[in-house]
Amino acid sequence: MQASRIAAAVAVAGSAVLALSAPAFAHVSVQPEGTAAKGGYAVVDFKVPNERDNASTTKLEVTFPADHPLASVMPQPIAGWTVQVTKSKLAKPLELHGKKIAEAVTKVTWTADGKGIEPGYFQKFPLSVGTLPEDTDELVFKAVQTYSNNDVVRWIEVQEDGAEEPENPAPVLQLSAATEDDHSHGSATAEDASAEHDDSKAAAGNSAEAASAADSSDTTARVLGVVGIVVGVAGVAYGVAAGRRRGTDSNARA
């Protein structure tokens, strides 16, 4: 009897823990694929769970931080979804790879073409972003999730230091310290691409020259081979003729 009461108490306590922890796992979040290093580029995934059991998520709007604008934002195509990238003019132009950028992405919107994210499922929305700022440890994105029954959930509350997590927290991307590899990998410019192209052309030219030289050598070898055969045949013929003459001379003497 006492064991049954203990089991029941554990079950109730477990249910309470799950109920309290559920909201922390159900909100829209953002995580990098690998690392998101300062001053570099990264692929990040916005993870969107469906919190409803009677409606599907049909739209996601992600607003980008105005205090740290990102000049390059490229979405990955997702089957069943249409994506729209919105850009706005910057009050203060950015300088990227020696060029001034007058506008940056301020919002990305995904709209479902079909059923969207059905109850019991989640969806990842990948973006390639950069160049990531070097003067902050995190980027705060504000997201709005719309359901097929017209319910709207605004994930826009910013976490305050030392305070409990808000009910509808905004997605936060944590940035890692920059490294030399991150800078060199993330700052590829048109000049770099051009240099790589020139290197490829030079390599192709060298290969062509090598192939031409090989063909020339092969042709020379074939010619020498034919000449050798002709000389050999001529030598054999000469030897046979000489042998016949010697035989004729011997018969004449006899």
Image (cartoon, rainbow, N blue to C red):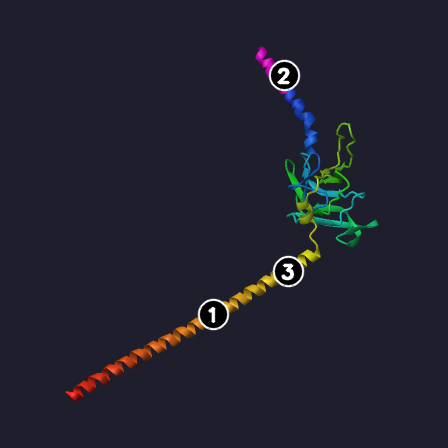
Please identify, in this view, whether the residue under mark 1 or under mark 2 is nearer the observer: 1
Q: Are marks 1 and 2 in contact (CB under 8 Å)?
A: no
Q: Amino acid at mark 3?
A: His
Q: Can residue 150 be seen from the camera position used here?
A: no
Q: Furthest-top residue in view?
A: 1
Disc ID at residue 217: 1
Q: Is residue 242 above or below residue 192?
A: below
Who is closer to the viewer here, 37 or 243? 243
The image quadrant where one finds the N terminus is: top right
Q: Residue at x 68, y 49 (%)?
A: 184
Which structural element holds mark 1?
helix
Q: Main secondary structure of the magenta part?
A: helix
Q: Going by the picture, which residue comes out furthest to the front?
A: 253
- The image's mark for residue 62 is none
Q: Which residues are magenta?
A: 1-11
| Mark 2 lies on residue | 9
Q: Residue furthest bottom?
A: 252
Of callouts 2 and 3, the N-terminal one:
2
The residue that appears at 78% across and 37% down in the rendered structure is 156
Mark 2: amino acid: Ala
Alpha carbon of mark 1 to alpha carbon of mark 2: how far?
A: 89 Å
Q: Position of residue 130 (x, y in %)?
A: 72, 47
Mark 1 vs 2, N-terminal side? 2
Q: Are marks 3 and 1 in contact (CB under 8 Å)?
A: no
User: In front here: 195 or 101?
Assistant: 195
Q: Secondary structure at mark 2?
A: helix
Q: Which residue is mark 3?
A: 197
